[in-house]
Amino acid sequence: MKIGTSMPKTSPTSTNPEPEKAVAVSVSASRTRWTHIVAVCTALTALAPIVMGAQTTTTNAGMAFPDWPTSDGHGMLTYPWLSSTGAKFLEHGHRLGGALIGLASVVLMLVLQWCEDRRWVRRLGYVVLLAVILQGLLGGQRVVRDALNSRGLAFVHGSTAALVFALMCGVAVVTSRRWHLAGDDAPVDDSNPGIPSPFVAWLAGGTWIAVYVQYVLGGLVRHQGQALIEHLVFAFVAGLLVVMLGVTAAASGHRWLRGPSLAAGVVMLLQLALGAGAWITKFGFNDRVAVAGSTEQVAFRTLHVLNGMALFATVTVLALRVFRLRWVARKSGTLSWASGTDAAPNPRPSTVVTRGGVA
């Protein structure tokens, strides 16, 4: 027997962590997918009270019922809505839509609490629910306090509706898979790191504010008959900012920004066209006489409001994506926040993990 020979060593049984990691990643991806689906469905559900509310305001049907939360003494679900007509059909439909989005907001809040790892996103679920409740109470006070200042409350109710809808769209963005993998998404041009410049970030914030100001000015025209000239002049300011944001964001080279950049430009052009139609059908033009309450007037004015809210939501999505890309780049060391310059070593930042999960 050769003395230097050693028998093969047997290592203790070890578990391979790779399958467990794969299962964990699969479960996390599934939860992310479901939270995103629920968030998108919540935003889409909000369109029901928004559409009915826009028609209600256009046709001055907001005071079809003197009572709230009942409708002519009937409960929300016991009122014969389908057999009603005109103003009462629109107003009660708006109330039913409000109840529906309230239920959807509760579901969103619960899903976020069960499936979302990030604390700040879970808190957004509470914020959405609280915003919907306050929006409903504000609409109710518009009816109860009609003798005091109904049009003023209606103006506030309509202005805050855009903020609530943008908030829901924002939750849909931050729960998406692309939000988690923003840094891994390849830019359109390999020579371009795809990181929006500081100018694009500031432009995104400024455009968001400008579009909302324009929406509020439109509300003053719609509810109070005021600020018509200001609304017309500022439309060109907001429109120019939207176009600049869309062009500069798309030129940054990141695929994640191309969709909302193009959508913002298209919706902006459509908004200008609808605004012109709303003006002509309300005030007339040349030999064309405006007919109050005509079908085309109601259609143009309602679509102008709805498209304005869609524009605000689109700019919200685009701004959030711009801020997200810069945040990921800064956290991964590819962006110097102080100087606003891009660092060369890692042109494609990877997903950033913080306490409580992926940011």
Image (spheres, helix red, strand yellow):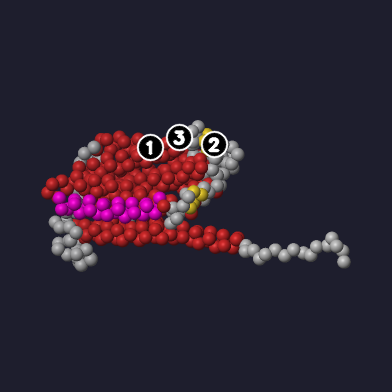
158 is within the stretch colored magenta: no
Q: Please, which residue is most extreme toward the front here?
A: 3
* Residue 61 point in image, percent of width and height: 19, 54
The tag earlier along the polypeptide, 1 or 3, is: 3
Q: Please, which residue is most extreme toward the left here?
A: 147
The amino acid beneath tag 2 is: Asp
Between the residue at mark 3 and the residue at mark 2, the CA separation in whole angstroms equals 13 Å
Q: Please, which residue is most extreme toward the right here?
A: 1
In this rendering, the answer to whether 76 lies above or below 164 is below
Pick the quarter of the image with the N terminus: bottom right
The tag earlier along the polypeptide, 2 or 1, is: 1
* Residue 310 point in image, percent of width and height: 35, 48
The tag earlier along the polypeptide, 3 or 2, is: 3
Q: Identify which residue is drawn at 60% across, 60% down.
A: 18
> Considering the numbered disc 3 on the image, is that residue within a helix, a strand or a loop?
helix
In this rendering, the answer to whether 26 lies above or below 287 is below
> Considering the numbered disc 2 on the image, is that residue within a helix, a strand or a loop?
strand
Magenta residues span 120-145
Mark 3 vs mark 2, foreground winner is 2
Q: Identify which residue is drawn at 20% across, 54% down.
A: 140
Q: Which mark is residue 342?
A: 2
What residue did someone put label 1 on? 206
Q: Identify which residue is drawn at 23% across, 66% down.
A: 77
Between the residue at mark 2 and the residue at mark 1, the CA separation in whole angstroms equals 22 Å
257 vs 133, left or right, is right
Between the residue at mark 1 and the residue at mark 3, the CA separation in whole angstroms equals 10 Å
200 vs 236, left or right, is right
In this rendering, the answer to whether 232 lies above or below 63 is above
Q: Identify which residue is drawn at 35% across, 45% down.
A: 312
What residue did someone put label 3 on? 199
* Residue 197 point in image, percent of width and height: 49, 36
* Residue 169 point in image, percent of width and height: 38, 51
